[in-house]
Image (spheres, rainbow, N blue to C red):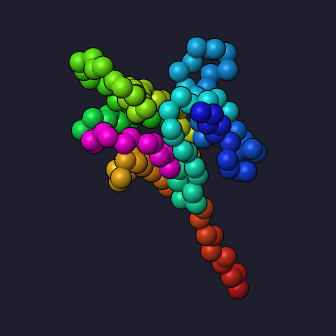
Amino acid sequence: MTTLLKPMSSWELDPFDLLWKNIFDDNSKFNTLVDKINYPVDIYEEENGVTFELAVVGLDKEDIQIQVQGENLRIKYEKPQSQERSYLYKGIVRRSFDLQWKVSTKFDLSQLEASMDRGLLKIFVPLSEEKRPKLVEIKTIK
């Protein structure tokens, strides 16, 4: 499975605006837009924020931890230890994940909203108030 995160044409202008990694640290735990993520994740920017969607089929909301610390967003699931079975066929991948991104300050992580529906975890992070487009009133001078 190859998942390249570069679907938005606006990201091509500044690929490190949303998610970035310390370019001086090869072992950085933050993903860039062009790095592969080894878990089914979609990340897309909307007019008023950014959305992260993760496939979490078979998990309950209590199984998943979402942590925000500063500019860091972390989504984690630890697969419980289970008894070994003798499978005739094993096609369902059940694995732990620990995903972490450094999110641009143009988004407000303190206003993050998370929901689950039909095996899809959706996390929406709105634009910061100061980064939202504002209409400027033109005054008439008499």
Q: Is residue 69 shown above or below 11? A: above
Image location of residue 109, percent across then percent down: 44, 43
Q: Is residue 84 magenta?
A: no
Count of residue discs: 0
Residue found 58% across the figure and 52% down from its top: 45
* Quarter the C terminus occupies: bottom right
Q: Residue furthest bottom?
A: 142
Image location of residue 15, percent across then percent down: 70, 38
Residue found 55% across the figure and 45% down from its top: 43
Image location of residue 84, percent across then percent down: 27, 17
Q: Is residue 58 visible?
A: yes
Residue found 47% across the figure and 29% down from its top: 100
Q: Is residue 58 shown above or below 74? A: below
Q: Nearer the viewer, residue 36 or 84?
A: 84
Q: Nearer the viewer, residue 104 or 52?
A: 52
Q: Residue furthest front?
A: 88
Q: Magenta residues?
A: 51-61
Residue found 53% across the figure and 54% down from its top: 49
Image location of residue 27, percent across then percent down: 58, 14
Q: Is residue 57 magenta?
A: yes
Horizontal relation, residue 65 to residue 70: left or right = left
Q: Nearer the viewer, residue 28 or 92?
A: 92
Q: Is residue 69 visible?
A: no
* Quarter the N terminus occupies: top right
Residue 94, quarter of picture: top left
Horizontal relation, residue 109 to residue 82: left or right = right
